[in-house]
């Protein structure tokens, strides 16, 4: 898009293994480009906070309405797996921060290594998540891919396909063995929140892989590391949301 | 926004990306250790019955952890004022959604005792009969 | 120099016809893949314009059906779909994206003295998200339509046997289109202002778009998660909004209106911005209360987050919440009245040019006064319990949505048309169309206030015969309104082919958008602009530029 009479600003590469960066035509300086993208990305992160915020509002709304359902529901989740996953995400956040730092200091190999470790963290997280979902499906608290879709009130009976359904009866009960009001609601919120969070983990891992491609080409260095920085922010946001999900879902207060 | 931006005689420093802050690895590691300790603390705290305060304690610890991630891992401590305002305002506006929605639900019980849900329920009410799912 | 053969002169003139954003390149991909904010603005204009015409067609069908008490055209089910299509198309495909997407995209970077918006690729993505949203909306019609009203209230939307998931996904994409536009405008306003263009030298259209953008970014994500939850609800019966599974449909309304009340201001603030520009330019007077208008935009944006519960007075909220929401609602009237008074004060003793943009502006001022004041009436808790879901509400929000926002959009379109295309439309036809639209609009919606206050409920396919005179008048008005719009579209399109060349500065504006060549070149300014004067300072106006034809 460069235009006659204008020649673009170029940030030189710090070494032979790197490539220079050309500032986009409509910016006057690299600082302007950097700050614009960064402000835009913080705005985007703000929208992510509000998007998840709706789910958190629903959580608190029903936690308030059905406290027992949530207490017993939380006990069905394995808090040890949750704690391991929390630690994995925190560690991957650390590797991501270190990856951004390596890019800022033009250390190509280290950037590559830390990005790879972060993706590894994402993979471990998703594998653990998969086994958690699998266990819950086997216990019939929700069923992939049908989830709760047989959970309807009226119409003809379809009990044959609903083996999972009786399990909820057995598990979601109070001290006296009486069924809890709307026992499935905790799992509905659990699945919705963790699935949307998991989607963000996958997108984040994909973005880091894309960053690694750029790192291999030598695109990111002390003069230009903007995309690494932004993807790093995204990854920390994924961590940030999980920090709240862990106590709310696994250690229901 | 300089009008002379196309002048190539700029010093190398000015062509850098502005005031970037490179944090030390030690700081990142220290933050990570604190975060892991706080994760352990939140698990331990959840084992002790503080009554309704459990939720408050859990959210307090999570907020401290979140602040550490935002300030250090996300470099917000060294970011520009506008970026700080933008990100923190999302929490401010989110709190509006929380406050009004939860306040409505909480005060509805004052009007209508039937909204209180502590009462025992029949099995049929809690687990209505399943049926064919709606297809699209 | 006069000895040149005339034919050479012509050839020379042709080859030296100045390059602008319209003629600098051609071909399908030069438009479909463009990163230029002006071309994206034109594409938005075409897209949202078509959506407006489609929505208008649905409106005419609704009005024709209601000609007779038992309905003329449709079964009750079909009627439900038609009014839903009218609402959803108008709100999500036209009113929300139209002004920021078309005029905002076109004019905001020009007003700031920037070469483009800060994030041009994101800008193009916004447009294509809009297109995908529109395609999904069309697909939803093919897949069986949707009959929930544009509000998608649970639990009906969870159980109706229609293509709710498809249109829900469409609205999710449209939401992100809107978010990205807003995000882009915020960054552009912060980072790409020309040297000397301080915050209080920014034109008020920019201030309005900035306040709008804050709302787009902060409110729209909640709509996104709400429609996602509705989709999950339909696919998996998670139960969050379903009372039969322990969910609370009032929570849906909280989520929906947390977005959709601010969304009302996403729609109306850009319209306020256009009117602020136009009253100043066409009265040739600096704006009365410039800073007050600027701050009132921000005040409206913030207050709009505190009042959403006034849409839910009959939904089963707690009385305490209703009291708080009703009380807070009245505060919206303060910044809004500040604007209205400031506009009127700007016109007062001004050198008023009664051309077509100004006619639309004056129509706006009258209609918005009615629309705004009836809003205060509806904000009162006890009155609303009587008027809720009647035609009084329908009339109120049409006075704001159609009468104010669409008319402000038309005003802006007529104002910047010569800037965008370098041609002028037929001014006489424009005035006729404006008067027709104004008359048609009032004939359509004034009777609705009356029948609403007598108890005619909205969204009903049939009615008792006592209401027939009102409904008939309303239908006649809709036809007049429709023919006015048809006339407007015809002469605007015709002007592209047979229109006179516009002046360099058609109306004598002094903001940066009028100081670039008309139509603007690809990167907007031949030389990077520098602002040294206060905004709306007409003593700096280069009168010659208002009399020089372009080219």
Image (cartoon, rainbow, N blue to C red):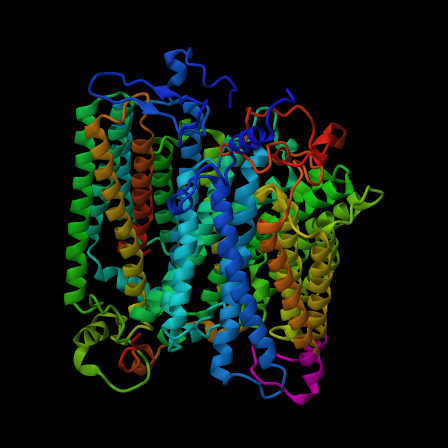
Is residue A196 highlighted in magenta? no
Side of A196 where A212 appears, left or right: left
Along the viewing direction, whichever of C365 and B128 lies nearer the viewer: C365
Left or right of C376 in this view: A198: left
Q: Residue shown at 30%/60% (left/top)? A: A192
Q: Identify the magenta region.
A: C450-472
Report if residue C359 is visible in the image: yes
- Quarter location, residue B24: top left
Q: Which quadrant is the C terminus of chain A positioned in?
A: bottom left
- Residue visible at 68% across and 84% down in the picture: C468
Q: Quadrant of residue A114?
A: top left
Q: Taking the image as drawn, is residue C269 in sight?
A: no
Residue C142 position in % (x across, y down)? 38, 72
Q: Which residue is drawn at 49% across and 70% down?
A: C85
The correct choice, above or below, for B126 with respect to C310 in the image is below
| Residue B76 x %, y % | 40, 32
C257 up-or-down from A232: above or below? below
- Residue C496 drawn at (x, y percent): 58, 50
Q: Is residue C457 highlighted in magenta? A: yes
User: Observer-nearest residue: A9 or C252?
Assistant: A9
């Amino acid at each position: 898009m460069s235009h006659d009479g204008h020649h673009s600003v170029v940030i030189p590469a710090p070494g032979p293994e790197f490539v220079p960066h050309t500032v986009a035509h409509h910016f006057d300086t690299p600082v302007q480009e950097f700050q614009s993208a960064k402000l835009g990305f913080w705005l985007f992160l703000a929208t992510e906070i509000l998007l998840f915020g709706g789910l958190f509002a629903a959580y608190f709304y029903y936690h308030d309405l059905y406290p027992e359902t949530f207490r017993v529901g939380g006990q069905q989740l394995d808090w040890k797996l949750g704690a391991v996953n929390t630690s994995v995400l925190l560690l991957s956040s650390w590797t991501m921060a270190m990856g951004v730092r390596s890019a800022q200091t033009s250390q190509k190999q280290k950037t590559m290594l830390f990005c790879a470790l972060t993706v590894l963290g994402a993979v471990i997280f998703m594998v653990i998540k998969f086994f958690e979902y699998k266990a819950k499906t086997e216990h019939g608290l929700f069923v992939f891919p049908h989830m709760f879709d047989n959970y309807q009130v009226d119409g003809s009976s379809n009990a044959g396909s609903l083996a999972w359904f009786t399990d909820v009866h057995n598990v979601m009960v109070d001290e006296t063995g009486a069924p809890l009001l709307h026992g499935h609601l905790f799992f509905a919120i659990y699945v919705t929140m963790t699935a949307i969070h998991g989607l963000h983990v996958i997108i984040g891992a994909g973005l880091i892989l894309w960053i690694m491609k750029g790192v291999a080409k030598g695109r990111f260095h002390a003069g230009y590391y903007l995309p690494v920085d932004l993807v790093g922010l995204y990854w920390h946001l994924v961590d940030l949301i999980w920090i709240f999900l862990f106590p709310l879902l696994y250690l229901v207060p | 926004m300089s009008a002379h931006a196309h002048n190539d005689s700029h010093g190398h420093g000015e062509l850098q990306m502005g005031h970037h802050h490179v944090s030390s690895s030690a700081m990142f590691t220290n933050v990570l250790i604190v975060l892991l300790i706080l994760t352990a603390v939140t698990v331990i705290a959840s084992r002790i019955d503080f009554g309704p305060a459990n939720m408050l304690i859990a959210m307090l610890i999570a907020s401290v952890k979140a602040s550490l991630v935002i300030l250090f891992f996300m470099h917000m401590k060294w970011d520009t004022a506008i970026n700080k305002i933008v990100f923190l305002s999302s929490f401010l506006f989110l709190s509006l959604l929380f406050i009004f929605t939860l306040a409505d639900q909480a005060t509805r019980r004052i009007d209508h005792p039937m909204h209180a849900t502590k009462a025992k329920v029949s099995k049929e009410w809690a687990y209505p009969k399943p049926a064919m799912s709606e297809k699209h | 120099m006069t000895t040149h053969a005339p034919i050479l002169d012509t050839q020379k003139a042709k080859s030296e016809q100045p390059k602008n954003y319209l003629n600098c390149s051609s071909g399908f991909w030069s438009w479909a893949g463009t990163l230029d904010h002006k071309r994206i603005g034109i594409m938005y204009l075409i897209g949202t314009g078509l959506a407006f015409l489609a929505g208008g067609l649905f409106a005419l069908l609704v009005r024709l059906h209601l000609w007779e008490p038992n309905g003329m055209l449709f079964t009750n089910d079909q009627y439900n779909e038609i009014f839903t299509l009218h609402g959803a198309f108008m709100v999500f495909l036209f009113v929300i994206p139209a002004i920021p997407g078309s005029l905002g995209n076109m004019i905001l970077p020009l007003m700031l003295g920037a070469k483009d918006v800060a994030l041009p690729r994101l800008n193009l993505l916004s447009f294509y998200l809009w297109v995908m949203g529109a395609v999904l909306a069309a697909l939803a019609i093919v897949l069986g339509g949707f009959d929930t009203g544009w509000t998608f209230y649970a639990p009906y939307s969870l159980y109706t046997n229609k293509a709710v998931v498809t249109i829900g996904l469409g609205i999710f994409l449209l939401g992100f289109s809107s978010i990205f536009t807003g995000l882009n405008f915020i960054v552009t306003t912060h980072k790409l202002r020309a040297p000397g263009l301080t915050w209080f030298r920014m034109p008020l259209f920019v201030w309005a778009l900035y306040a709008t953008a804050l709302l787009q970014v902060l409110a729209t994500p909640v709509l996104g998660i709400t429609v996602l939850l509705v989709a999950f609800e339909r696919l998996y019966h998670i139960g969050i909004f379903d009372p039969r599974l322990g969910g609370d449909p009032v929570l849906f309304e909280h989520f929906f209106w947390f977005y959709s009340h601010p969304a009302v201001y996403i729609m109306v603030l850009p319209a306020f911005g256009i009117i602020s520009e136009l009253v100043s330019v066409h009265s040739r007077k600096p704006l009365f209360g410039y800073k007050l208008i600027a701050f009132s935009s921000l005040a409206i944006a913030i207050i709009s987050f505190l009042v959403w519960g006034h849409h839910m007075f009959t939904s089963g909220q707690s009385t305490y919440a209703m009291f708080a929401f009703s009380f807070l609602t009245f505060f919206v009237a303060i910044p809004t009245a500040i604007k209205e008074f400031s506009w009127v004060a700007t016109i007062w003793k001004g050198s008023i040019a009664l051309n077509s943009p100004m006619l639309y502006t004056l129509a706006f001022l009258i209609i918005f006064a009615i629309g705004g004041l009836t809003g205060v009436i509806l904000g009162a808790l006890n009155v609303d319990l009587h008027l809720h879901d009647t035609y009084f509400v329908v009339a109120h929000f049409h006075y704001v949505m159609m009468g104010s926002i669409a008319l402000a959009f038309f005003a802006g379109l007529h104002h910047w048309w010569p800037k965008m295309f370098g041609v002028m439309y037929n001014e006489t036809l424009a005035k006729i169309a404006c008067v027709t639209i104004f008359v048609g609009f009032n004939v359509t919606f004034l009777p609705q206030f009356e029948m609403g206050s007598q108890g005619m409920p909205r969204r009903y396919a049939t009615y008792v015969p006592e209401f027939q005179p009102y409904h008939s008048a309303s239908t006649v008005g809709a036809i007049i309104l429709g023919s006015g719009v048809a006339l407007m579209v015809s002469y605007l399109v015709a002007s592209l082919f047979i229109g006179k060349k516009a002046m360099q500065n058609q109306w004598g504006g002094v903001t940066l958008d009028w100081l670039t060549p008309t139509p603007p070149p690809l990167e907007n300014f031949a030389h990077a602009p520098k602002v040294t004067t206060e905004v709306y300072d007409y003593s700096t106006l280069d009168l010659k530029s208002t009399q020089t034809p372009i080219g």
